[in-house]
Amino acid sequence: MKRTKVIDILKSTEFGKDVCVKGWVRTHRSSKAVDFIALNDGSTINNVQLVCDADKFDAELLKQITTGACLCATGKLVESQGKGQTSEIQCENIEIYGLCGADYPMQKKGQTFEYMRQYAHLRLRTNTFGAIMRIRHNMAMAIHTFFHNKGYFYFHTPLITASDCEGAGQMFQVTTKNLYNLKKDENGQIMYDDDFFGKQTSLTVSGQLEGELGATALGGIYTFGPTFRAENSNTPRHLAEFWMIEPEIAFMDLDELMDLEEEFIKYCVQWALDNCKDDLEFLNKMIDKGLLERLQGVVNTEFVRLPYTKGIEILQEAIKGGKKFDYPCNWGDDLASEHERYLVEEHFKKPVIMTNYPKEIKAFYMKIDAEKPVCMGKEMEETVQGTDVLFPQIGEIIGGSVREESYDKLMGEIERRNIPMKDMAWYLDTRKYGSCPHAGFGLGFERLILFVTGMQNIRDVIPFPRTPNNAEF
Amino acid sequence: MKRTKVIDILKSTEFGKDVCVKGWVRTHRSSKAVDFIALNDGSTINNVQLVCDADKFDAELLKQITTGACLCATGKLVESQGKGQTSEIQCENIEIYGLCGADYPMQKKGQTFEYMRQYAHLRLRTNTFGAIMRIRHNMAMAIHTFFHNKGYFYFHTPLITASDCEGAGQMFQVTTKNLYNLKKDENGQIMYDDDFFGKQTSLTVSGQLEGELGATALGGIYTFGPTFRAENSNTPRHLAEFWMIEPEIAFMDLDELMDLEEEFIKYCVQWALDNCKDDLEFLNKMIDKGLLERLQGVVNTEFVRLPYTKGIEILQEAIKGGKKFDYPCNWGDDLASEHERYLVEEHFKKPVIMTNYPKEIKAFYMKIDAEKPVCMGKEMEETVQGTDVLFPQIGEIIGGSVREESYDKLMGEIERRNIPMKDMAWYLDTRKYGSCPHAGFGLGFERLILFVTGMQNIRDVIPFPRTPNNAEF
């Protein structure tokens, strides 16, 4: 008989129909006359209940059906007597596919996330991680659908790169060299002409620069791929390998960029609310009681658009009014998390897109504003068209900017900052041949999943996290 | 005025309306009274024609508008007088965003693909590469949509891996070690306790094993991510970094796997026919005159399902009938390309899914068939439930199998083959705790793009190819 997924069984009201389900045992309760087996197949967070009359089944067989075992069960779909479910299966036959011993590490309920991280391959079978992974899939689907509907093309930028302009110190080296016999020149410098790519290579930290090549040809593109940081950061917010989304769009100005950022996040959150209801309700109940309200809040709120200079003025007002911060926040300072939180959580009480940052605290490729800002009556230094989307609780979720399209201005910044642009002529070519105004942003996928699931540790929203001293599975 | 994309301009029949387009100049023809500028913005392979009355424009401005320059043009949408297009723009104003000098490398038409590979960042602006990249995007969208509709979840398997069971010799090493001062033990062995992950790590060659962890928890998953091979293969079919799709589905048997493979490819090809018509017609005209017919053929044909043993019998028959092959094809041999081509292109003249291969020529994790096959009257050795989908011209496009779900049989193969399974206990756990029948396949994304575009060299269907001695851009 053809298998029906649990998600479809639970929606069905064809009572009396013969059905076949396959899945893993979550719980097995025995009473004198009847056994109740809760079966899950990963298609939904909800289990289907198998009702087994003890006199119809071999007692030895039923004894083998423990938590974690894999079964194929056939029987009649019947209306459920219990609360909280509409249908269950009056079981007629059970075939055991795989037994599961008492040493099964996901046996008990209520284990800590830390414990479960050791069993990242088996935690996927729990309610919480099933929910997270289904939401993760849905967020990826939302992202592709959003950009596809806008006519932006998914663009694969390379992972192995020979460019080091974003700081080689934090990059992983990629090599096929024999480390026992390293070829060196007369000065003792390691030579890379015999390495696979004929030069030193690393894993990329961003696809943005290559993304700009796509945007200035195809009009609008987005990347969605793995990105790497060799930072020795053992925090709940950092991974050495994570997924990033980086749209880049020709002919987009600052206002349109902020529109896109806001529309994009709202679209993803709305998708989760529309398509992941059961999983979100579970997480809202078990992990974070404010989750659903926070998600609803984001889709129903207009984000604040706040120039950095105006933000500084608000913070300085607050200090005058008695507010204490640990770090200074004078014009030109990179804002600390406490400042961002004050603006987002206390002052505006909604997401904030901060813009027009001082040039010195932002990247070389950001477009320089035409006019210098005035802060508390005084003219300040140059600003750039960068945008950070700041969220309650989570902080920066998106960083973007309009890109400097002027070859001369861009070269000026590159030279002033001594950025190594060796082998980067291809990037400058976009400004040399038919340069165009363009803009883009970057979103750390796992940061989005943290926000949408209410989870606290980034290691719990990716199947197999890579962190310092950890590359298991 | 709000910009309209060229793809939308060309569909519009609102003649007389004021419009604004932005894009790059493909050609610029001047006559005495009128200039014709073909503008493309990447949204479609087609250009919109700007008609500029010479007396309305500064001659100096018009002179600056060369191939590759970037413009913003406004004017009235009018019905086209020319052939092959319905609308054009009677131009009223032009702003030049970016000039383009005569040294622009994509200036001339008819340059070789080899030449263009040197300018992979600029070739994206040509008709051919624009078409390929739009099709590439559409194939990714088709893949996500196909699996999403089936209820399979996009599952991110790790790229950096510490497992070496697929053969470390062809893998790229990933390290943050200081190569000038390598820590070694008393035997001179390099120690990795001070490397980023505390052990030796490489870039993955496949996400399948981790994918099985996902499938045996979530029911059905698919991966779609970069994969790496450090093979020194300088061929038109190999990349060091390529994208792979690997679905893995619990409770799937051999027939269902073949159904899925066939349905999947047909869905992708049909998507291309439905959504990439202009680009395919261009490629059919310029690159491969048989392309559209071949694509239509695939969606309209039922694939042949051919046990390996039956294939050997057909090949042996052919040899008896006088057919000559360079390599032998006795039962137990791995078939050469010439044998596969004979079966696909000459004997059946349609795609073939070959199954039930001799155990010795396939991977350790494939499910062993219950019965030994009989070939030309004699019983042969054990076979496994592997499937290769063989296509005309392109050869193997998909490789898949039912996975061995028996812990004992799987361990037997691992031991017999001396496969290093150190640190791989997590994989065996899927067979230890609630093991289930499951199956999956792998598809090289660029192979699919080669087939759908009719291109011949895999370096031309990915934006920035990585091959031996080449990691540019």
Image (cartoon, coloured by chain):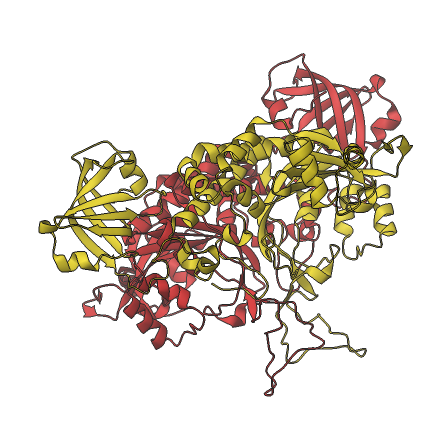
Chain colours: A yellow, B red
Instruction: Specify the farthest residue to the bottom.
Output: B187
Q: Please name whichever residue, A328 or B86, is drawn nearer the observer in this view of the structure.
A: A328
* Image position, residue B72 (x, y; %): 75, 27
B280 or B383, nearer to the observer: B383
State left or right for residue B2 relative to residue B348: right
Is residue B259 shown to the viewer in this render?
A: yes
Q: Residue furthest right?
A: A378
Residue B351 on image: x %, y %: 37, 49
The N terminus of chain B appears in which quarter of the rendering?
Answer: top right
The image position of residue A65, as x and y in percent, is: 22, 56
> Does B126 sit left or right of A265 as displayed?
right
Give the total number of marks visible in the rendering: 0
Which quadrant of the figure has residue A367?
top right
Q: Could you say which is closer to the camera, residue A94 or residue B231?
A: A94
Residue B270: give x, y in percent of width and height. 43, 37
Above or below A308: residue B343: below
Task: Farthest residue to the top: give it.
Answer: B16
Residue A5 or B373: which is nearer the viewer? A5
* Residue sitting at x 62%, y 53%: A158
- Looking at this rendering, what residue extends furthest in the left direction? A55
Which quadrant of the figure has residue A215? top right
Asked whether, in this view, residue A332 is left or right of residue A46, the answer is right
The correct choice, above or below, for A445 with respect to B317 in the image is above
Residue drawn at x 39%, y 64% as measured from the top left: B427
Visible residue check, residue B470? no
